[in-house]
Amino acid sequence: MAGVAPTGWALAAAINQWLLYGAALLATGSGLFGLWVRTPPPAQDLIRVVGRCAGVVAALCYLLAVGLIGASLLESGPFTARAWEIGLSTTLKDSAGFGVPAMVILLLGFARPVARQRVIVPAGAILCVLSFLVTGHPVVAAPRWVSAPAYALHILGAAFWLGALAPLVRCLKVLAPAEAWAVVAAFSMRAVYAVGAIVASGLVLAVMHVGSWDALLTTDYGLRLAVKVALAALVIALAVYNKIVLTPALAEGNVPASRHLRTSIAAEFVLLILIVGAAVVLSLAPPPAA
């Protein structure tokens, strides 16, 4: 979100942003997965625990980001009045203004029955998306009527995917293969749309920010984007393998397939966290086409 070289306090700000991105997406995605995919009680309990923990962490990181950006500009501690004064003059104040209420709403949603979450969780998800749209690269991507929906799709698709992984692993661990397959298959159907939204919106944003093939290969932003795209290609390839090979084997009651799928989903999680980190690194470089 902030275009500051990652040295000193700026490095702390970048690490905080990585944690913020991951926790906010995980809290939002846990809520969305709980709404869109029917899961057994053990997975529902895990969704609530993960969502609540991620929501608390994200809310704290939203607030800390304001102080850390001030500290990175001053090269002093983030808990001085001057650091917060500077931080509150940046767009990270607006981001926290949407992000903290988003996490509070999601926390309230996780404490309610699923039927009541149908209003609460989408409200939290919308505010979470807005917290990303009011700062950093989304602000300079023009025209906004194209970039804002593209960013929103990108964020929601990534959130749903990230939020799905822990409950999927829990289902594969505690349910019989045929029962676990029902949950995995339901997620897989929706994941096709999520991945499609991520890829399509990513292409739109890449064109808007990079502008040319030459800029992709010769600019700092372009090279960082190439790393993110490479990681995304790996995780999508892994997801395709899961869908085409392991999920059908799970439907046949293949017990080893359940174990292999758990391992593969864990690898997806690691790759997605790395992609989140790549997004943070990408946010530190100015887009060539800005």
Image (spheres, rainbow, N blue to C red):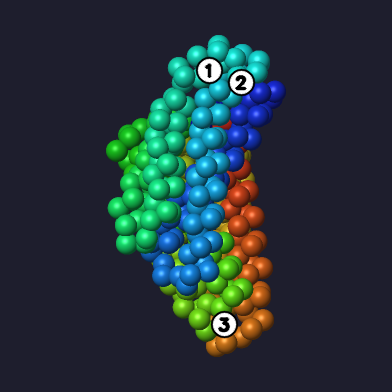
Q: Report which residue position mark 2 lands on.
A: 78
Sequence-wise first label, 2 or 1 = 2
Question: How far across and how far down the image is residue 141, in percent?
Answer: 40, 33
Helix or strand or loop: what does disc 1 sit on? helix
Question: How far across and how far down the image is residue 21, in percent?
Answer: 53, 42
Left or right: 143 with respect to 167? left
Determine the residue positioned at 47% across, 27% down: 92
Determine the residue positioned at 64% across, 83% down: 255
Q: Report which residue position mark 1 lands on.
A: 84
Spatial CA span between label 2 and label 3 = 50 Å
Report the amino acid beneath label 3. Ala
Sequence-wise first label, 2 or 3 = 2
Q: Report which residue position mark 3 lands on.
A: 176
Question: How far across and how far down the image is residue 172, in percent?
Answer: 58, 74
Report the amino acid beneath label 2. Pro
Determine the residue positioned at 50% across, 45% down: 55
- For the C terminus, the quadrant is top left
- Give the answer, above or below, for where 94 lies relative to 56: above
Furthest residue in direction bottom, as rendered: 252
Spatial CA span between label 1 and label 3 = 53 Å
Spatial CA span between label 2 and label 1 = 7 Å
Using the image as rendered, state which of residue 233 and residue 26 is in the foreground: 26
Around disc 1, counting alpha carbons within 10 Å, would you say few (fewer than 14), some (14 to 19), or many (20 or more)?
A: many
Determine the residue positioned at 55% across, 72% down: 171
